[in-house]
Amino acid sequence: MRPGERRTPRVPGRDAREQAREDVDSELEFHLDRLIESNVRRGMDEATARAEALKRFGDPARARAGLGARAVARERRLRHTRHIDELRQDVRQAVRSQARSPVFALAAIATLAIGIGANTAIFGVAHGILFEPLPYAEPDRLALLWQDNTLEGDARYPFSPANYRDLVDRTRTLAAVAVYQPSSEVTVAIDGTAERVRSTVVSTEFFDVVGVQPALGRTFRPDEGVAGGPPVAVISDAYWRSRFAADPAVLGRSVELFGNPLTIVGVMPRGFTVPTSDAVDIVSAIRYAPESWTVRARHSMRVIARLREGATLEGARREANDLFAELERLHPATNRGMRVTLLDLRTALVGDVRTTLLILLGAAAVVLLVACANITNLLLARASERMREFSIRAALGAGRGRLIRQVLAESAVLALAGGAAGLVLARFIIGAVRTLGAASLPMLNRVDLSGPVLTFALAITLATVLLVGLLPALQGVRARATALRDEMRGSSAGRVRLRTRRVLVVAQVAMSLILLVGATLLIRSYRATLAVDPGFTTDRVLTFSLTKMGDAAERVRFFEEVERQLAVLPGVDGVGAVSMLPLTGAGGRRRRTSSASAGGTGSRRR
Amino acid sequence: MRNSDLTRASRGPGSHGLLEIDDAALYQSLHRLEDRGCVRSEWGLSDNNRRAKYYTLTPRGRKALTRENESWRTYVQAVVTVMAPERAE
């Protein structure tokens, strides 16, 4: 033991348990000895006295075992309450010590809140989009298919009905194939009242492909997918609750869509949606006329398929491309340069967002590391000021573990407060992302502060406790070894301390530089995107959408009337109508402007 | 009071040797009482300078004793009343 170092009698756990057993032994031994003594006094010889005492005592081995176990358990309980007491003391001490320098504490908490908040928010977005299971059975076996129009360089070209039919008839790798459409806003009439809903159409096989059972009623029968068959629809759980108050009698009710009455036959389970659409209220069955299957030149079908058990994406891709090479030979007029794009569902939906999100996740992690380094440094600086305090504590008998725990308690108080504030921040950021990112991020409705995200937040908060607290804690322990007098001179410990802090500063600057460069590049490419000329001016242009039911002539009349009346409004320079706004639309890349639109501007990307 | 004294008391002249309790069992209950906070123990030195454990009744133990004593008396009273010779005849 070095001079200046004092060791208080502390008994670690195992020894304490042994001690408890020994106490029991010596208590029983004492008792037996007393019995023997008194027997001897009554005139027995030594051996008889012992035998008599044992007879009176009962089974000493059993008593020993029973009492020993009880004593050990008691010791464990005592130790437990002692730990809790110490913990409470540490936390109280930590809070008090932070309250003494509120500016430091607030700055540290704010820094950590930004770090933890940003990480939680981005993890929340990434989790919802990249990791959370898709709302279908065995989603790994699902794939989306497009025609790959190699001549126009459009890899996501919808299928034509005849090509789709050929694929369905010939495939050996796909267990089931169906057609879906992204949802769009339409007007429906229920009981004569019109309302806007998100609606889509799917072929009758769709629900078999995705493997989703309705929560109520049924999905579509094959005869409902043929022209002239009964017009039917299923509705989403959310729409069932909001519009029909979760009334089971909704089955059989009628919804009028584009002037056609549809019968509701089922309610889908919560969270169900069609691919590429965040949410959908009404899904109706596409009814194909038999003659439509011969059309090879019109492209309107988005295709989803389920791989056969054991089939690979690569195998399915090869098979489909072989088929299309053959179709190219048979139908050169319509299929020249046509191949197939086949992607697993997650990749198809998430695409290049994955890389962006992973980069952002990395950047957020670096931000947190910088924040941690920063606070560690501040804590180290404070720890130097507190060397005396630690030395005195050590001199008064605070053990190594106790000192480490105390410093860790301080960083824990900071990190937990930062984590709590970070959660509030993350909630805010996620709300903002859901509002602002709607156009550019898929599956945003699945992004939330869910259980796994909260667990992640807790995990990084705890990691932060260690990251921020460990170095200062070790320093505190070193202080224990340093006698008070060392504090007065420039000791070697002081030099080590300084070096640690310098390393931290260098790391901080390096990481900040990486972030800065990354951010600059991001801003540059964003500015470049903004600078791309879309071919039309977006200044002072407002848009809105509306749907009119009725026959074509009636609709044209209606839109012309709307345009005429809008045009006479003061402040309106020009009015136009278009079926789909330029550079919008889910998934598709080809835009068609409505011939009925007056002055509508069409634009084709690429 | 040490347990060894306690066992002697239990077999002492007052009990007329009617109460024969296993010493080991007595220790078990003593430790159980300690767990419940009815007695407190501390190590001390016996009259011939050996390390010995001394047990003291805690306030809680005293209260428990009073309670048990009363309930015992009530019980005995009830039994005596029921078994009174004039009723038995």
Image: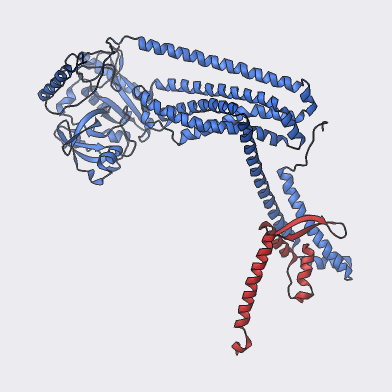
The chain letter corresponding to red is B
- Identify which residue is drawn at 62% across, 32% down: A410
Please give left or right for residue A463 compared with residue A151 in the image.
Answer: right
Image quadrant in which you'd find residue A83: top right
Q: Residue furthest bottom?
A: B89
Q: Can residue A204 be seen in this view?
A: no
Q: Where is residue A534 in the image (x, y as percent from the top left)?
A: 30, 11
Q: Quadrant of the C terminus of chain A?
A: top left
Image quadrant in which you'd find residue A174: top left
- Identify which residue is drawn at 65% across, 44% down: A85
Q: Position of residue A432 (x, y in %)?
A: 40, 26
Please give left or right for residue A297 compared with residue A208 in the image.
Answer: left
- Identify which residue is drawn at 81% across, 31% down: A4
Relative to the observer, which residue lies in front, A602 or A69? A602
Q: How many labels does the image show?
A: 0
Please give left or right for residue A373 compared with residue A331 in the image.
Answer: right
A562 to A271, vertically: above or below: above
Please give left or right for residue A390 compared with residue A326 in the image.
Answer: right
Q: Can residue A316 be seen in this view?
A: yes
Q: Quadrant of the N terminus of chain A?
A: top right
Relative to the observer, which residue lies in front, A302 or A104? A104
Relative to the observer, which residue lies in front, A598 or B17? A598
A416 to A53, vertically: above or below: above
* Chain A pictured colour: blue
Q: Where is residue A312 in the image (x, y as percent from the top left)?
A: 38, 27
Q: Position of residue A240 (x, y in %)?
A: 27, 40
A528 to B70, vertically: above or below: above
Image quadrant in which you'd find residue A173: top left
- Structure colour scheme: by chain
